[in-house]
Amino acid sequence: LQNNMGIIYANKGEFENSLDHLVQSYENFEKIEDKRGMAASLNGVGVIYHNMKEIKLALENLNRSYELFKDINMKRGMAASLNSIGSIYQEVGDFEMAFDYLTKSHNIFKEMNNEFAVAATLNGLGKYYLDIGDYIKALTNYKNSIILREKLGDKLGMSSSIRGLGCVYLQNGDYKNAIKQLEKALDIQKEKD
C-alpha cells in the first residue's frame, strides 16, 4: 500500500510525500525480509531522487535496487534498474557508463523476450547514439524500435520513437524528413489524447 501511495504522490509531482511512502514501504518489506518488495521500493526512491535532480542519491538507491533484484534473480527488475541507471549517466554526460548500463538492460530484456521493453531500450539506445552524434546507429535503433512497437500496437511508444527519428534527421540537416517524422509523431500523439 505504501509503495502504491508513493507512486500516486510521484505522479502528482509531490516528491517529498512520495519519498516518505516509498521509504516506509522499504522499511515494511525489510521487516519481513521481502527482497522483491525492498528492491521495488528502492527503485521507486531512486526514480524520485532522479526527478528531484539528486543524482548521487538516485544512483545509490537504484544500485541497491539492482543488487537486491540480482540476489533473487528477478531479471525484469534488474533490467529496469540498469536502464534507469543508464539513463541517469546519459543525462549527466557520462556516455561510457550510460552505454554500458543501457546495453546490459537491453540484453536482459532481449533474453527474456520482453518485446515491449526491448522496443523501449532500442529507443533509449537511439537517444544515446543521437547524443554522441552517431546518426547511423541512432537511425537504426529508432527504426528497429518503431518496427517492434508497430508490431505490438504500441502507438504511444511509436510516437516517441518516430519523434526520435525526426530528431536524428534534424541534427543531420535533413529538414524535409525531420518535419515529416515530427508531424507523424504529433499526429499519433493527438490520436492518443
Image: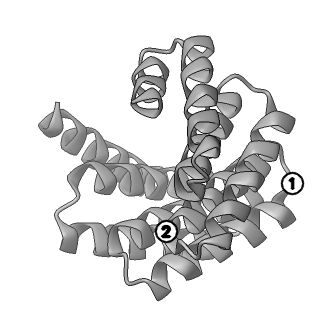
- Residue at 45% in and 18% down: 9
Is residue 168 in view from this perspective? Answer: yes
Q: Earlier in the sequence, mark 1 or mark 2?
A: 2
Q: Which residue is mark 1?
A: 94
Please report contact status of discs 1 and 2: CB closer than 8 Å, yes or no: no
Q: CA distance from mark 1 to mark 2?
A: 24 Å
Q: Which residue is mark 2?
A: 76
Image position of 100 with respect to 172: above or below:
below
Image position of 144 with respect to 38: above or below:
below
Name which quarter of the figure residue 137 lies in. Answer: bottom right
Name which quarter of the figure residue 168 lies in. Answer: bottom right
Image position of 181 with respect to 76: above or below:
above
Element under disc 2: helix
For this rendering, which residue is in front, 85 or 24?
Answer: 24
- Residue at 57% in and 82% down: 107
- Residue at 61% in and 37% down: 26
Name which quarter of the figure residue 8 lies in. Answer: top left
Tell me which amino acid carries mark 1: Asp
Task: Residue 160: give x, y in percent of width and height.
Answer: 39, 49
For this rendering, which residue is in front, 22 or 57?
Answer: 22
- Residue at 30% in and 74% down: 148
Q: Quadrant of the C terminus?
A: top left
Q: Residue furthest front?
A: 32
Q: Of tags 1 and 2, which is closer to the observer?
A: 2
Task: Residue 169: give x, y in percent of width and height.
Answer: 51, 57
Q: Residue furthest bottom?
A: 111
In the image: residue 176, left or right of residue 125: left
In the image: residue 162, left or right of residue 26: left
